[in-house]
Amino acid sequence: MAGISNAQVHEVREITRIERIGAHSHIRGLGLDDSLEPRKISQGMVGQLQARRAAGVVLGIIREGKIAGRAVLLAGQPGTGKTAIAMGMSQALGTEAPFVCMAGSEIYSLEMSKTEALTQAIRKSIGVRIKEETEIIEGEVVEVQVDRPATGVGVKIGKLTLKTTEMETIYDLGNKMIESLMKEKVQAGDVITIDKATGKISRLGRSFTRARDYDATGPQTRFVQCPEGELQKRKEVVHTVSLHEIDVINSRTHGFLALFSGDTGEIKSEVRDQINAKVSEWREEGKAEIVPGVLFIDEVHMLDIECFSFLNRALEDEMAPVVITATNRGITRIRGTSYSSPHGIPLDLLDRMIIIPTIPYTEQELKEILKIRCQEEDCEISDDALIILTRIASETSLRYAIQLITTASLVSRRRKSTEVSTEDIKRVYYLFLDEHRSTQFLKDYQDEYLYDQGANGQVTETPEMEVCQ
């Protein structure tokens, strides 16, 4: 009997969280204080003090929203945190302004012209804050009465009693309003708002007067004050949409659905001109304001001369976002030409940019970054293993060392350990080659590879090629 009970052991897995961990998911902001001074380690950012301070100044320009059409270039060696700084700016901005990311090579794979792809990206980065007044009913729910037909089939009717600090009113409810209340799980003690135009019901939270109704409340329970004044109020509602969304909705019959399907296609310039005129009219009337956001183009050296010429002109427009670019190239050829230029960017466009340099990390900074990544990936690592991982990062690359964290964690779990040891790091180091060892391996065994190019650049035949002939 004991043998049967031992055999029937069920594995119980407790899932605490299910989420994707990305390369920059540990970044929460730029790690600056109120005076724009960077902290050494803050909000997932480590080192790059001068670059982060400069990015903080650019962030202030974006938040003011008065200066647009500026271009910023983040330039530095691979693995020096250029994209991390851009992601930090995105996190620091939050929902204040649109932040659109794209890679320089994206424009070549889209089913539209290169200039159209850039135009759409630019207009996605420009927000329009539209203001409108609406009538709402706001109050604390005193009682909800719902009368259901005895047969269970038919129209439901009910009454809703709402109060503020000064008045109390009973409203008759129709079938749709009852369904909305049930969907939102509204009960006595909730503070709600009802949009008179659409009938939409929103729960603001529980009233403080009902805070003692239950011995235990969930962490998500929010307590608010009972509303003051009259139940019916006029409230200013602000909607923020991008210019691109307005373009798509107005360019086709089912434009709103096209936003979800992603099949926006090319948009005629006449449509955009009409929308620009209408938005300018709203600005003069005080109904809307423009919110210039950020367009981040990573690997900007992948753009060609046509795209650079288009960006040069687009930056002069009054409705242009702040364009932040990043590159890890030195003096290289401008794509689409035979000319070379710093960072692969034409000099006339480079002259418009303010350049923020990034420098290689010190060994101590690499250690702190790896420690943060281990915390992000829920990986317990010993101090000795972290020292070895830091040495690997300084001798090879930070990206390679970060990749070893997950693999070493899997190896440690295979041997039923909760902590990554030095042996786990050594094992995955020998299992997975870095760039330098892989290159050395090719040099050692280059004669055995197909279509090998020797030192003189000529294709040399291998034994396999001779057999094929």
Image: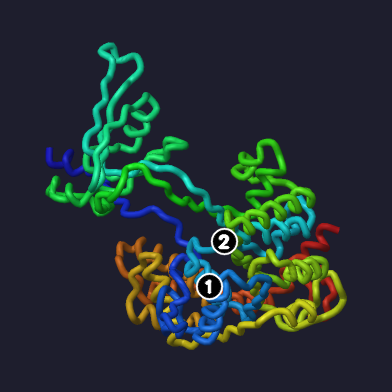
Q: Closest to the observer: 6 or 78? A: 78
Q: Which residue is mark 1?
A: 84
Q: Closest to the observer: 129 or 356? A: 129
Q: Locate residue 349: give its quadrant.
A: bottom right
Q: Position of residue 282 (x, y in %)?
A: 63, 54
Which quadrant is home to the C terminus?
Answer: bottom right
Local packing at callout 2 (Cα closer than 10 Å; few below 14, some 14-19, many 20+) is many
Q: Please tell me which residue is depicted at 51% across the width and 83% down the height of the picture.
A: 53
Separation (CA) of disc 2 from disc 1: 18 Å
Q: Is residue 389 visible?
A: no
Q: Is residue 10 above or below residue 460?
A: above
Q: Is residue 200 above or below residue 38?
A: above
SS class, disc 2: loop
Q: Give the residue type that dot 2 points to.
A: Pro
Q: Which residue is mark 2?
A: 98
Q: Please tell me which residue is depicted at 27% across the width and 35% down the height of the picture.
A: 169
Q: Closest to the observer: 110 or 200? A: 200
Q: Position of residue 233 (x, y in %)?
A: 38, 46
Of tags 2 and 1, the one toward the viewer is 2
